[in-house]
Amino acid sequence: MKVKLKIRKFEAKKDTLPSYKTYEVEVPETATLLDCLDKVKWYQDASLTYRRNCKNSICGSCAMNVNGRTILACETHVKHELTVSKRNELIVEPMNNMPVLRDLVVDMAPFWDALQAVEPWLQPDESKVPEKEYLQSKEEVHLLDKVAGCIMCGACFGACNGREAEEKFLGPAALARAWRYTMDSRDARQKDRVALYNEPHGAWDCTHCFFCVEVCPVNVAPMDQILKLRKMAMDAGMTNNPGARHHVGFEKIIEKSGWLDEVKLPVVSLGFNLIGQLSMIPLGVRMFTKGKMPHLIHTPIEKIKEVRDIYQLAREEEKQQRKMLAAAIERKTREKL
Amino acid sequence: MVFILQHDILIVGGGLAGMRAALEASKYADTAIVSKTHPLRCHSVAAEGGIAAALGNTVQDSWEDHMYDTVKGSDFLADQDAVEILVKEAPAAIYEFEHWGVLFSRLDDGRLAQRFFGGYAKPRVCFASDKTGHAMVHELYAQIMKRMTKVYEEWYVLDLIIEDNMCKGIVAWDIPNGKLEVIRAKAVLLATGAYGRVYNTTSNDYASTGDGLALALHYGLPLEDMEFVQFHPTGLYSLGLLVTEAVRGEGGYLINGKGERFMKKYAPEKMELAPRDITSRAIETEIKQGRGINEQPYVYLDLRHLGEAKIMEKLPFVREMCRKQMGIDVVKQPIPVRPTVHYSMGGVATTNEGEVITSELKPFSGLYAAGECACVSVHGANRLGANSLLECVVFGKRAGAAMGNYAKATSFAEIKGDWFPKAEECMRALFSGNGKEKMITVRTEMQNAMTEHCGIFREEKSLKTGITKIKKLQQRYTNIILEDTSRTFNTHLVEVLELGSMLTYAEAILVSALNRKESRGAHARTDYLKRDDKNWLKHTLVYKKNNELAIGYRPVVITRIKPEERKY
Ligand SMILES: Cc1cc2nc3c(=O)[nH]c(=O)nc-3n(C[C@H](O)[C@H](O)[C@H](O)COP(=O)(O)OP(=O)(O)OC[C@H]3O[C@@H](n4cnc5c(N)ncnc54)[C@H](O)[C@@H]3O)c2cc1C
């Protein structure tokens, strides 16, 4: 079959603006995007530049954007892509959120730096390292396996909304990896880790956009792990940061009135922080002039009792679950002894 | 001359062997890794099945048993002193990786699970589902990050600096920035991995172009046992991607066009779990004799009877890969497979400490090799699966320690030659873009020639034709044209350089295969059907002398196990 590719070309040291070049290749119906790129590079335009290596979804080299979605070129079937996108050509571009070096190759330094920052190595209690292997349950391995299976392709980082807004945000892959060590029974620094990941630009910078979950080629579901890190922080009483306060504030406001008080929320989130509060004024003024000012008087909704009942139910449910969990742990410990 | 870049120890290649060596060496002296791909993109991440060690977690096992299976698997060509080191150090190596956080699969009681693999008498293979290489590489790289060992990422090593019979550093091309660099060092390790890309169908990644072999050969250093090329029995037809042996380890069947489990004819006892050389020949024979599926050049690998639960627990990656690459659900459909070029038993000849040796069998100062590009030799004529990750970590560590001690005891040697200007001149000539021959044409012809003339079955006339073809291609390569002359991230340049490497040692593979007039392990000669211990129980060395390839030999070290007939 014939495949048309519209590829973004750009060379960092030479070009001021990117351009698009269209290629047409003849490939078998089973061809992947990588097969097409190889064909272009080897037979039409040797200057086309991209990374690739294992051709088998495991080395993480060939993440790029196709029709605006981040994928691995080696596992993306062009026929399928053309069918679902209902287009007659594929638009191939480099990942976002990282500077482009050339064509589809980005400089991944920001990604690696974020990874380094979460101390992504096991930190056991050096005085308790066993002679042979640590004992670890099948369930634990199963729990961590999916997340540890991350191939560091950077797709989530490229697609991340939080990262687009905040350059210092560690991003999905690094934090998912962070969760994996935090939960590993062989690691001895769980508490320090939770604190580290809840510092500014850690877990609380995530905007819940779900893009990382969507684009991950190996189902790491980074956002889920980030949310778990937040929960761990809250459970450990680490609530004195804007992210956590936002969370708690949100919960309290809804319980009180049944709907969101947009005036009060930033006040609660930012806490006792005069500069922070003042920094909200320009936004407030802009909202006012655009007619987007929230109600200043916030009254509870009619069926507020029902909302409060839901809260009550959820709390009881959680209490119950904790009790069960504690009992299970106690049983296990007794069995071991 | 002042050197801007200088490290006591340089590791060429950021794979499992290179990183393990770097980690060890960095305990002794200033160490850096130079790698043409980022370490996490190395080929080792693709290893699926597992890593062998006689832990005895499910049945009674011993290093002696592991040694016997390995030596027998090697068709008695492995050096038994080296094998003894490999199997004795195996358990500690596994525990070390486990302590670094590898999520190995477990038994119910929390200890490491172990499974069967081809050629082993016992379940001896530890694994992290079917992503063992990935799990090990990522945790090892974590240790590299922790130590902050310097990594020159995406730098291609072009040349070794060799003067006064010693290695004094490297010349490299910084791919992102398009710059030549010279790095001075006291000791250099070659850990450049596999060379499967010299063939047209392989399970190896794009970067497996055996650059380290070409560097050694260029300086007159010998390559050992290059005729032994391992074909993995179950390459996904027709892509060549690997379907791990773990599939058969967990009980998968091989089925021919008549619906028979044909392995009963070739290895009645071990059946699908016979070593790779035997199983690959069996599949090719079935295909040649018209018993492929619908008489096509493939057979079926069937795991439907294992059931979805077991497949999801033990082989999730296989299921995912078959779905992604072929649209096949292995729970419901058999997998079409054919042997694919997978592993090189041969490589740069070394001692047990990783020192590269000369054709006179003496260590060469300052140069070391480890991992798949080296030949210690622990695999002899045929490697058993799961022994190669093990080789990388055991001998990588040993080489690292040896280099560390060497670097501590020596000082930097003066570099006399004008290596930088010479390399620059070479690059300038290439960048002038004056050649005529296109990389893709020459490379395709080379890959086809190797596949046709040096495949699973070999024979004198065909091998000679192969040599003639490769020599012509080497000539044509001198007139290669660089089709992309940008200095930013020029991946075409990398492919051109890799082709130069491959053409250098392709001839060495053919010459070694032509020279060995017997059939042993992965080397099957249709004109010499039998193993011949009287004349050929010895390692082949091939090296450059006056610009021609010369042959030498290295005795096989036999300590505990006497060669016997090999039956499965
Ligand atoms: C699909 C597959 C599955 C496998 N499964 C198993 C298994 O289950 N068990 C097992 O024991 N073995 C397995 N093997 C074999 C095993 O994975 C390899 O032998 C081993 O990983 C090789 O490691 P290495 O460190 O020597 O090389 P690699 O991991 O290939 O690393 C080589 C490094 O050198 C770099 N390099 C190369 N040339 C240059 C240059 N010119 N300049 C700079 N850098 C360079 C590369 O970029 C790379 O980083 C498998 C192999 C394949 C192909």
Image (cartoon, grey):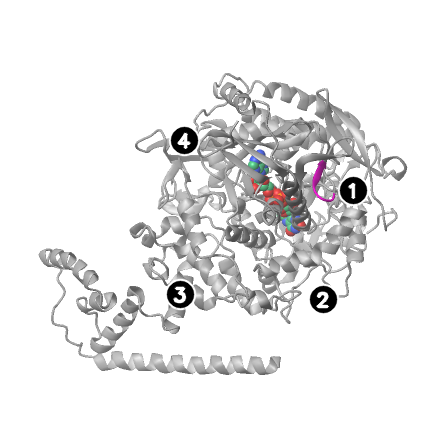
Task: In the rendered view, tell whether residue B247 sits above or below residue B196.
Answer: below
Which mark is in front, 1 or 3?
3
Residue type of the residue flagged with mark 1:
Gly
Residue A68 falls in which quadrant of the image? Answer: top left
The residue to which callout 4 is attached is A23
Question: Looking at the picture, how far across and down is residue B127, in whole percent?
Answer: 63, 58
Task: In the rendered view, tell whether residue A292 sits above or below residue B20.
Answer: below
Structural distance between the alpha carbons of marks 4 and 3: 50 Å
Q: Residue at x 22, y 75 (%)?
A: A258
Disc assigned to residue B58 = 2
Q: Secondary structure at mark 2?
A: loop
Chain designation of label 4? A
Q: Secondary structure at mark 1?
A: loop
Residue type of the residue flagged with mark 4:
Tyr
Question: Looking at the picture, how far across and down is residue B323, in whole percent?
Answer: 53, 51
Chain designation of label 3? A
Q: Does the beta carbon of the residue at mark 3 sit less than 8 Å from ligand 1?
A: no
The mark that comes first in sequence, 4 or 3, is: 4
Considering depth in this image, is A23 or B224 the residue closer to the camera?
Answer: B224
Q: Residue B184: in sight, yes or no?
A: yes
The residue to which callout 1 is attached is B521
The mark that comes first in sequence, 2 or 1, is: 2
